[in-house]
Protein backbone atom coordinates (compact mmCIF):
# COMPACT_ATOMS: atom_id res chain seq x y z
CA UNK A 1 0.00 0.00 0.00
CA UNK A 2 1.21 3.50 -0.80
CA UNK A 3 0.19 6.52 1.28
CA UNK A 4 1.32 10.14 1.13
CA UNK A 5 3.11 11.73 4.06
CA UNK A 6 2.26 15.19 5.39
CA UNK A 7 4.43 16.74 2.67
CA UNK A 8 2.73 14.82 -0.15
CA UNK A 9 5.59 12.36 -0.64
CA UNK A 10 4.50 8.80 -1.47
CA UNK A 11 5.55 6.10 0.98
CA UNK A 12 5.16 2.37 0.44
CA UNK A 13 4.03 0.51 3.55
CA UNK A 14 5.74 -2.86 3.19
CA UNK A 15 4.19 -4.54 6.24
CA UNK A 16 0.65 -3.17 6.42
CA UNK A 17 -0.35 -5.46 9.31
CA UNK A 18 2.48 -4.17 11.51
CA UNK A 19 1.76 -0.56 10.45
CA UNK A 20 -1.93 -0.91 11.37
CA UNK A 21 -1.11 -2.52 14.72
CA UNK A 22 1.29 0.31 15.58
CA UNK A 23 -1.23 2.99 14.59
CA UNK A 24 -3.96 1.41 16.73
CA UNK A 25 -1.68 0.83 19.73
CA UNK A 26 0.09 4.19 19.81
CA UNK A 27 -2.00 6.69 17.82
CA UNK A 28 -5.63 6.12 18.79
CA UNK A 29 -7.82 7.01 21.72
CA UNK A 30 -10.87 4.81 22.30
CA UNK A 31 -10.36 3.31 18.84
CA UNK A 32 -10.30 6.67 17.05
CA UNK A 33 -7.30 8.43 15.49
CA UNK A 34 -5.80 10.99 17.90
CA UNK A 35 -4.31 13.41 15.31
CA UNK A 36 -0.77 12.67 16.50
CA UNK A 37 2.28 12.43 14.23
CA UNK A 38 3.71 9.07 13.27
CA UNK A 39 7.28 8.96 11.90
CA UNK A 40 8.48 6.05 9.82
CA UNK A 41 11.77 5.93 7.92
CA UNK A 42 11.94 9.73 7.73
CA UNK A 43 8.32 10.12 6.58
CA UNK A 44 5.78 11.84 8.80
CA UNK A 45 2.07 11.03 8.89
CA UNK A 46 -0.76 12.80 10.69
CA UNK A 47 -2.90 10.06 12.20
CA UNK A 48 -6.29 11.52 11.39
CA UNK A 49 -9.52 10.17 9.94
CA UNK A 50 -8.16 10.43 6.39
CA UNK A 51 -5.12 8.22 7.07
CA UNK A 52 -7.07 5.90 9.33
CA UNK A 53 -9.76 5.32 6.71
CA UNK A 54 -7.16 4.86 3.99
CA UNK A 55 -5.21 2.12 5.77
CA UNK A 56 -8.29 0.34 7.13
CA UNK A 57 -10.41 0.45 3.96
CA UNK A 58 -9.72 -3.19 3.07
Image (cartoon, rainbow, N blue to C red):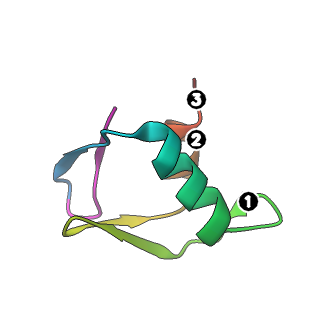
Q: In the rendered image, which residue does mark 2 sit on?
A: 53
Measured Cα–Cα span from mark 1 to mark 2: 10 Å
| Pointer 1 local density, CA inside 10 Å: few below 14, some 14–19, many at least 20 | few
Residue 33 placed where, x, y %? 65, 62
The residue at the point 22 percent across, 47 percent down is 11
Q: Residue furthest bottom?
A: 36
**Residue 21 among magenta residues:** no
Is residue 15 placed above or below 32 in the rendered structure? above
**Is 36 placed left or right of 5 in the picture?**
right
Is residue 23 placed above or below 54 in the rendered structure? below
Instruction: Classify the position of the N terminus by image quarter.
Output: top left
**Is 31 placed left or right of 4 in the picture?**
right
Is residue 13 placed above or below 57 in the rendered structure? below
Q: Are marks 3 and 2 in contact (CB under 8 Å)?
A: yes
- Which residues are the magenta region? 1-7
The residue at the point 44 percent across, 39 percent down is 16
Pointer 1 or 3: first along the chain:
1
Q: Judge whether residue 27 can be spotted in this image.
A: no
Q: Do the residues labelled 1 and 3 touch (CB within 8 Å)?
A: no
Residue 32, disc: 1
| Pointer 2 local density, CA inside 10 Å: few below 14, some 14–19, many at least 20 | few
Residue 37 placed where, x, y %? 44, 75
Measured Cα–Cα span from mark 1 to mark 3: 14 Å
- Determine the secondary structure under disc 1: strand
| Pointer 3 local density, CA inside 10 Å: few below 14, some 14–19, many at least 20 | few
- Determine the secondary structure under disc 3: loop
Pointer 1 or 2: first along the chain:
1
Q: In the rendered image, which residue does mark 3 sit on?
A: 57
Measured Cα–Cα span from mark 3 to mark 2: 6 Å
Amino acid sequence: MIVNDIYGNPYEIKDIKSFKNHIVEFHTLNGLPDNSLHEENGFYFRVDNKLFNQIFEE
